[in-house]
Amino acid sequence: MLELWGISKSYGDHKGASGVSLFAPSGSRTVIVGPSGSGKTTLLRLIAGFEAPDAGTITLNGRQLEGIPPHRRNIAYVAQEGALFPHMSVGDNVGFGIPRQATDRSRRVEELLEQVGLPAEFRNRRPHELSGGQQQRVALARALAQRPDLMLLDEPFSALDTGLRETMRTMVGDVLRDAGIASILVTHDQAEALAFADHLVVMRDGRVADAGPPQRLYARPADIETARFLGEAIVLASVIHGGVAKTALGDVPVLQDDAERADVLVRPEQITVAAEGNGALGRVLHRSYRGAQWRLEIECRDGGLPEPFSVDVPASLDLRPGDPVRLSVNSEAYVFPR
């Protein structure tokens, strides 16, 4: 269990972290996400011991980490570029975290390579002979070799192409969960954060803007800014009466009885687009082909939405720029707290 209580860190006038508290249970996957300068990398460096907090405490399995140097914290760190030793073979890189006098050292190297999906013959290759994805697998195996209590992942998939990123993300998550190792991933990629996290932390201006299960943060975020950061958000001004919000996209069910003024959240996947029928009137501005789908950019012509929004529709729905469409919300919307 990793616990942070009231962590603050300043760099001159800039606050890298301000009163941050969070925890990561054993075997869990915590993701810290936020825009550049939000404080997510600062937190990772404080946990690793590369820097010391100005205030607050960090404990790992009940042990306070203040004053303990990085190499004695039993925390593994996987950097964005892997940071393999270029003069060492793959086997020597993986074995770096295993005591040289260990009698099972060679066997453990082979087991670790197998664990991350690399054949044993790779142990004699050098890092420059590997692809980006293979280098990241070696970096993970090297980190696992020290049998850490906590794994820190600093945007380790950002340099990989899209398909490989998803494969690596799944593999890393499975390996860490099977090993019972708590992990903290820092990323600026919202989709990656939602896919990897058991517990999601959204940082903004050095503070925790929202934290909890990713499904909750996406569907019921703490505020509009968090909603827009985690995906396209359509925010509708409304009046609520009897559990129904009156909006520019028509009547929408909500979990609130009455309110004279309220902002409600609708995600694009909640919107039904039709060439005809009932609903608010909109117009297609642009479209882009996605194989099984078209992504349409739509403006609401009734004036209730000041900005266009994008929505995916089946490729069989052949709507073109300039075509009128009918828009309706097909499921319950979320009312932002005031």
Image: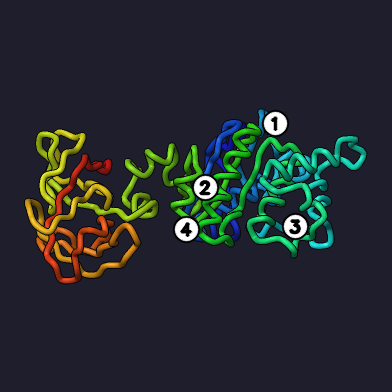
Residue 154 position in % (x across, y down):
61, 53
User: Would you name the residue on which mark 4 appears?
Assistant: 35
Q: Residue 84 carries which label?
A: 3
Q: Residue 32 carries which label?
A: 2
> What residue is drawn where x is 38% and y is 42%?
217
As shown in the figure, which amino acid type bears the numbered disc 1? Arg
Q: In this view, does 255 lie above or below 165?
A: above
- Label 1, label 3: how many angstroms apart (C-alpha)? 30 Å
User: Would you name the residue on which mark 1 appears?
Assistant: 63
Q: Residues within 10 Å of mark 4 (few under 14, many from 20)?
A: some
Tag in front: 3 or 2: 3
- Label 4, label 3: how many angstroms apart (C-alpha)? 27 Å
For mark 2, give the secondary structure.
Answer: strand
As shown in the figure, which amino acid type bears the numbered disc 4? Pro
Compare residues 310 and 64 and report the one nearer the observer: 310
Compare residues 168 and 315 and report the one nearer the observer: 315
Tag in front: 2 or 1: 2
Q: In which quadrant of the rendered view does residue 82 lie?
A: bottom right
Return the disc, 4 or 3, that comes first in the chain's sequence. Answer: 4
Compare residues 313 and 18 and report the one nearer the observer: 313
